[in-house]
Amino acid sequence: MITDKLTTFCNGVSVAGAAGTALIGDVIDLQNLRDLGPGTPVYLVMSCETSIITGGAAGTITFKLASDSTAAIATDGSATEHFVTGAFVTDDAALNDLDAGSKIVAVQLPHEFADTYERYLGILAVVGTTTVTAGAIDAFLTRDVSAWKAYADAVN
């Protein structure tokens, strides 16, 4: 699958960080692109490039597709949320949900009206309870997920 750099949020971007919410990678400026969803479906695809782990006790990580009026999408809960994943377990043992090559999500964007999406669209990572010490993700928008598959680094 070929992706466009203008529809890519991140490619191998680290999600390591302390408990809290952080903007991950780049944002997409929707100023000239409105009505996401109606017509031809658009999908958010996220995969784990490097295993997301914690150094000690297991924690969680959740991802949000959010939009805001500024490119520095707010991490305080005031950004408009369009999709939220479930919580994934982050551990360096067999309990880990996000090993390298695993799919995080491939979901059609919600059918929302132009005024629902704010100008900038991006990915927020919410690290719960304990620090994520390693891990990187890929995230992008596409119109075709039928042939999409996550591969471990250097395996495809």
Image: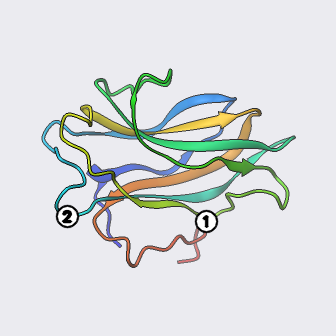
Left or right, 29 with respect to 90, comes to: left
Element at badge 1?
loop
Q: Is residue 94 above or below residue 9?
A: below
Which residue sits furthest left? 32
Identified at 86% across, 41% down, the residue is 57
State the scheme by which the image is colored.
rainbow
Quarter assignment of residue 61: top right
Crowd around label 2: few <14 · some 14–19 · many ≥20 (10 Å): few
Q: In the rendered image, which residue does mark 2 sit on?
A: 40
Q: Amino acid at mark 1?
A: Ser
Identified at 31% across, 62% down, the residue is 142
Identified at 58% across, 76% down, the residue is 155
Q: Is residue 45 above or below residue 19?
A: below
Q: Position of residue 94 (x, y in %)?
A: 84, 62
Q: Is residue 111 above or below residue 41?
A: above
Quarter assignment of residue 56: top right
Q: Is residue 136 above or below residue 153?
A: above
Element at badge 2?
loop
Front position among marks 1 and 2: 2
Identified at 49% across, 25% down, the residue is 75
Q: Position of residue 68 (x, y in %)?
A: 33, 28
Quarter assignment of residue 78: top left
Disc 1/disc 2 C-alpha distance (Å)? 26 Å
Q: Earlier in the sequence, mark 1 or mark 2?
A: 2
Q: Position of residue 126 (x, y in %)?
A: 59, 36
Q: Identify which residue, 43 or 155, lies in the foreground.
A: 43
Q: Amino acid at mark 2?
A: Thr
Left or right, 29 with respect to 83, comes to: left
Q: Identify which residue, 35 or 55, lies in the foreground.
A: 35
Q: Position of residue 156 (x, y in %)?
A: 52, 78
Q: In the rendered image, which residue does mark 1 sit on?
A: 102
